[in-house]
Image (cartoon, grey):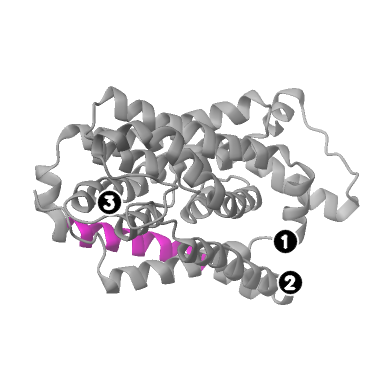
Amino acid sequence: MDIDRQLLNTGDQALLALMIVIIMFGMGASLTTGDFREALRRPKGIVIGFLSQFGWMPLIALGLALVLQLPPEQAIALILIGCLPGGTTSNMFAYFARGSVALSISMTAASTVLALIMMPLLLDLYASNFAARMGEFDPLADGAAGMVIPYGNIVVSLFLVLVPVAAGMVLRRVSPGWAKTAEDTAGFTAIIVILFLLGSVTLRHGSLFLQTPWTLYFAAISVSLIGFALGYASASAWRMRRRECRAISLETGIQNGPIALAVILLSFDEPVRSQMLWLPILYSTFVVLTSSIITLIFRRIGRIDDAIYCNNRVHMRLFGDKYQTHYPQEVGKLQR
């Protein structure tokens, strides 16, 4: 089974990078500094997100690898996916899911920086047994056989999140009208580019999809779905607002797949590399589909509580930060 292929060619990668920049800029155009102040006033959300990101996800990946009895190379690749920081696309999906975008962006930035420490520790903790069977994996070792953490990719990822968002916020402050145009354009661009990339990948790699065993499909799809569920459950257990629960759920289940590909390419030689690469490729492909489905569900069930949130913001701007809008009891429950 020939699996040593890139999921996206150079043109697709450039198009994907451009899409992310446009989306981040459009989301920034919908934000104000008050959104971030609110998130920082409620640090519990960032803490819960961190525990979900680096607590639940590696355990989910380990459990799936053991239950499905994956070969060592593929088990380590799955655990690597579970140890990754949140992907920048989680911010985009949080936006469309009527979640807290400010919280999602804050969580992405925090997990990206903390991944420098957490990834080697978690890989050493959860992948060492599989590494012993494979005979050439030591995340903390020096030399060619050790795991190479892609510091440049992580910095670029953080830069990609924060700079376009900041530019969009500046546009929002300078010209609210153009900011609204940028916000609407970002949503349209995301749909078109995602559909194009999915079609392009299917045409180029259709034969590999047919040759892949069901266990890899199940692992690639389930790791994100279980992450969505446990992320939402954890946030709900801590009595977070529903907008924040949706953001934490998406941030937990959506991992930064390109970093996984970079780590594998920088760390392993053939034939191990080929055996490990296909699982992150499958994950990166299907996470777009699963995230889209979850986002549509969240968007529908979050319609009322998001409207209440936006209404409260308008009232506070008009009457002051201490103003409290009063709703009937059954409607007021949706604020929580």
**Which numbered disc covers residue 281?**
3
Label 2 belongs to which residue? Answer: 173
Q: Residues within 10 Å of mark 3 (few under 14, many from 20)?
A: many
Q: Is residue 189 magenta?
A: yes
Find residue 203 and report its image quarter: bottom left
**Mark 1 vs 3, N-terminal side:** 1
Residue type at mark 2 is: Arg
**Which numbered disc covers residue 103?**
none
Discs 1, 3 touching: Cβ within 8 Å: no
Label 1 belongs to which residue? Answer: 32
Which one is in front in this view, the residue at disc 3 or the one at disc 2? 3
Q: Residues within 10 Å of mark 2 (few under 14, many from 20)?
A: some
**Residue 280 or 221: which is nearer the viewer?**
280
Discs 3, 2 touching: Cβ within 8 Å: no
Discs 2, 1 touching: Cβ within 8 Å: yes
Q: How many marks?
A: 3
Which one is in front in this view, the residue at disc 1 or the one at disc 3? 3
For residue 82, say whether it is visible: yes
**Residue 12 or 150: which is nearer the viewer?**
150
Q: Is residue 191 magenta?
A: yes
**Mark 2 vs 1, N-terminal side:** 1
In x, y percent, where is residue 145? Answer: 32, 52
Residue type at mark 3 is: Ile
Find residue 242 and report its image quarter: top right
Q: Residue at x 59, y 44 (%)?
A: 99
Residue type at mark 1 is: Thr
